[in-house]
Image: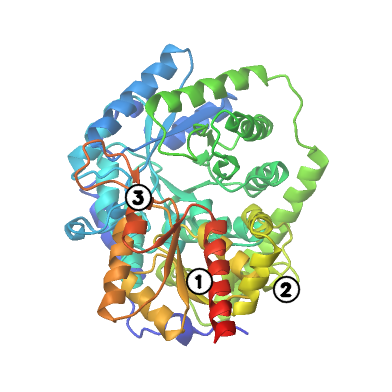
Amino acid sequence: MSLRRADVLPELDLPVAGDLIDAGRKLAKTHSIGPSPFLSEHGVACEVEYKQAQAAAGRIMFHAQVGYRDAEKSRRAYGEIHREITCAGFQLDRYGICLDWSMGYPAADRRGRPKGTGLILESPEDFQRLTAAAPVAPHFGDFVIGLPGAVDNTIAALAAGATAIGNLGQYFTFRLPHWNDDVATTAATLQALALCAAQPVDVLIHSNLDDGFAALFSDLACSLGAVLLERHIVEGLIGGRMGHCYGHTFSDPVARSAFQGALTEIGGGPGTMIYGNTTAFGPDPKANYDALSAYLRVDFAGQRAAPTGHAINPVPVTEALRIPEMDEIVDAHLFANRLLEDSAETEDIIDREVADNATALLVEGGRRFYDSVLAGLTEAEIDTGNPFEMLLALKRVGARQLVHLFGPGEIDPSAVGGRRALIQACPIREIEQQARHCLDGIGEDDTTAIRAHGFTACVATTDVHEYGKLLLEAVLRQLDVAMIDGGVSTDPGDLVATAVGGHADFVAVSTYNGIALDYLHGLDSEIQERNLSLPIFIGGKLNQIPADSNTSLPVDVSGDLQAAGAIACTRVEDMLTHLAQWAGETMSRENGA
């Protein structure tokens, strides 16, 4: 199997890359980097200059996340967290600002769009008021570059003094609800990249690999290859500066250390931040300190050995439960800074020989994947020297097919992606383990009943977070449940049509970004319009900000979901128990007949 241009880029009249780049450069003449307390206090022209100086001095930097729905609370947090950490004798270098994903729509097209739980900045002045609250580097890392609103948001971020803007990784994997124009998204992304590249100083184009292809690649070597592909586009073809982030899903200490070593080996950067390993956190905040300490020690050791300019992100131990409050963010940073002091003389907790061997394997495999992708696209008559075609082709081909066609591992139909991984990505291994745990939790009688019934499921997500869907698929696959792919970030009407077209017995929906109840209402409306009876299982983060809320905090809506007719599941096992009961009732009726 090979790629064909007609399948990937069938349009006869795509936008001209040169015209989009010229438009971005023209914008740079009137839209430049504005003042900020961070730039003035540290006497630097951009964050790249600051990072290089700190890394050269051997200092490890720190990163915090802010971005409550309430803009005033976010501004207050921007100032208060910095003051608390400074008063304790430590330094906070940068903030990742958590914009709501609805900010990804073009500014003129946001009204009436569905919203998540993040920060919404209504105007460029709101961007500036936020970054003026403390001398901390503003990192607009999500829902700026890579989505349809890229140009509007990049202009506002630059004016607010931001010189680290992303998230390019989201371009390849995210889709906003009710937005299907990937050509327009690509055009906006390329124009915004050119706007940043044309600034008189370095603007770091941020890409969180865990929000991009790395979240879906089964082979960690392909994730490193994605770094090279993104650099080829941004640095080689547009003249910008890339900075990569990873860490959310790197739970294995050796893989975490080896990946940082591989980034050092291939050069480039500086990096933006190393995110906390949030997948290691459980429901008990006190117990999460062990996981926090474990990944921080790995990251500290890596930065001491080979500084890459990445800032370290101590994730509050309450992250798995809810959006952390300001005092919890401060607490995580005080803990991390004290741990940094205490661990200065301790030995590396990683077996360096094992990690170094893994690093060498990643580098070799990543480069081989990069070369194979470029060769395959060229063979398909896709212009690898054209940044528009490169972006759109990679997005449309997608992670799974890229691994299947060009992965460095040997072909193996039984492996995820159809190839053996040189180093298996941590999420794939964890999902397989979680799936086995789910099955162990329901008992042999229930698993037998589900297998015997012959269910067909349509599995989808309400938003861009796919891990819940992957877990559902792994569990249902082991129960011999036939599956229809309902897609990621699928609109309710499309999901119902897919389920009906595939004769699904039920729909299983994974949700994350605070839209559970609104999404269910959309599904229910579509089902009633078709006069259907279609059971809906919904699980994940079953929360939403109430329309009449004055706190901006999401609340649990499990009861509302149940009242609206869904089967709300706090665990996958809840769904399996219902399926087993359903299968048993069906068998009883048939036997009785």
Residue 384's label in the rendered image is: 1
Is residue 97 or residue 35 the one in the foreground?
A: 97
Q: Residues within 10 Å of mark 2 (few under 14, many from 20)?
A: few
From this view, report whether residue 179 is shown above or below residue 441. Answer: below
Instruction: Select label 2 or label 1 by which is in front.
Output: 2
Name the residue rendered at 41%, 80% in the picture.
498
* Outermost front residue: 592
Q: Compared with residue 535, is residue 150 higher up or lower down, i.e. above or below?
A: above
Q: Which residue is mark 2?
A: 414
The residue depicted at 76 percent of the width and 71 percent of the height is: 410
Q: Residue at x 34, y 21 (%)?
A: 80
Query: From the viewer's perspective, is 463 left or right of 227?
Result: left
Q: How is the image coloured?
A: rainbow
Q: Of label 3 and label 2, which has the lower sequence position? A: 2
Label 3 vs label 2, nearer the camera: 3
x and y percent of residue 198 in the render?
34, 51
Residue 557 tag number: 3
Give the percent coordinates (x, y) of residue 301: 68, 31
Q: Which quadrant: the C terminus?
A: bottom right
462 lies above or below 267: below
